[in-house]
Image (cartoon, rainbow, N blue to C red):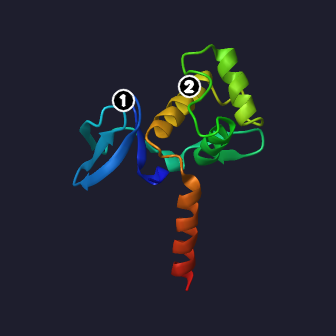
Amino acid sequence: MSLEKVLAIGGKPGLYKLIAQTRGGFVAESLMDNKRISVNMQQNVSVLSEIAIYTLTEEVPLKEVLKNIKKKENGGPTSVKAKDSKDKLEEYFFEVLPEYDEDRVYASDIKKVIQWYNLLQQHNMLDFEEESTTEQVKKTDEEE
């Protein structure tokens, strides 16, 4: 599943996948407990494909950060936990994204990225290489 269908909803823990759109919002299913909820347009919703992490030179898409974590962990869960100390989390994040901007990326952001990675990893949703190939084929077909 692509990150275009994975959502973070303000005030709700974990991640959700988009199930269907409704007149006033959409229906989403929790990746934590598979419960479905109705989300209206007034709620703060972020699509994971639109999230980026600040670095000293540019903004790196979340997808790239997740790929770096996957590579570091050989596809397994993270070696740090979201509840670890701020210093430990920052040290880990420097290994994953050495150029990240310490002034604009907070420990709470790092915790979220680690929680999201582990949740996506549990659900085998980290296969971005396959997705990229499909997107490339789609773009080539559209250009013809």
Q: Position of residue 78 (x, y in %)?
A: 59, 29
Mark 2 residue crowding within 10 angstroms, few (<14) / some (14–19) / many (20+): many
Quarter placement of the C terminus: bottom right
Q: Residue at x 49, y 45 (%)?
A: 48
Q: Is residue 37 above or below residue 110?
A: below
What residue appears at the point 46 percent right and 36 percent down from the top-left corner? Answer: 122
Q: Quadrant of residue 10?
A: top left
From the image, tell me which residue sits under label 1: 12
**Residue 40 quadrant:** top left
Q: Residue at x 62, y 25 (%)?
A: 79
Relative to 6, 53 lies left or right: right
Residue ID at (27%, 53%): 20
* Label drawn at residue 111: 2
Residue type at the position of mark 1: Lys
Give me the C-alpha separation between circle 2 and circle 1: 15 Å
Residue 42 visible (yes or no): no
Q: Does the CB distance between marks 2 and 1 fall below 8 Å?
A: no
Is residue 60 or residue 19 the one in the foreground? Answer: 19
Expressed as whole percent of the image width and height from the top left, the position of residue 143 reads 56, 81
Tell me if I can see residue 34 in this picture.
yes
Q: Is residue 100 left or right of residue 14?
A: right
The dot on residue 44 is none
Q: Is residue 39 left or right of residue 93?
A: left
In the rendered image, residue 125, in percent from the top left (x then y), is placed at 48, 46
Q: Amino acid at mark 2?
A: Lys
Of pointers 2 and 1, the one earlier in the residue sequence: 1
**36, 47: nearer the viewer:** 36
Q: Secondary structure at mark 2?
A: helix
In the picture as drawn, the residue positioned furthest to the top comes out as 85
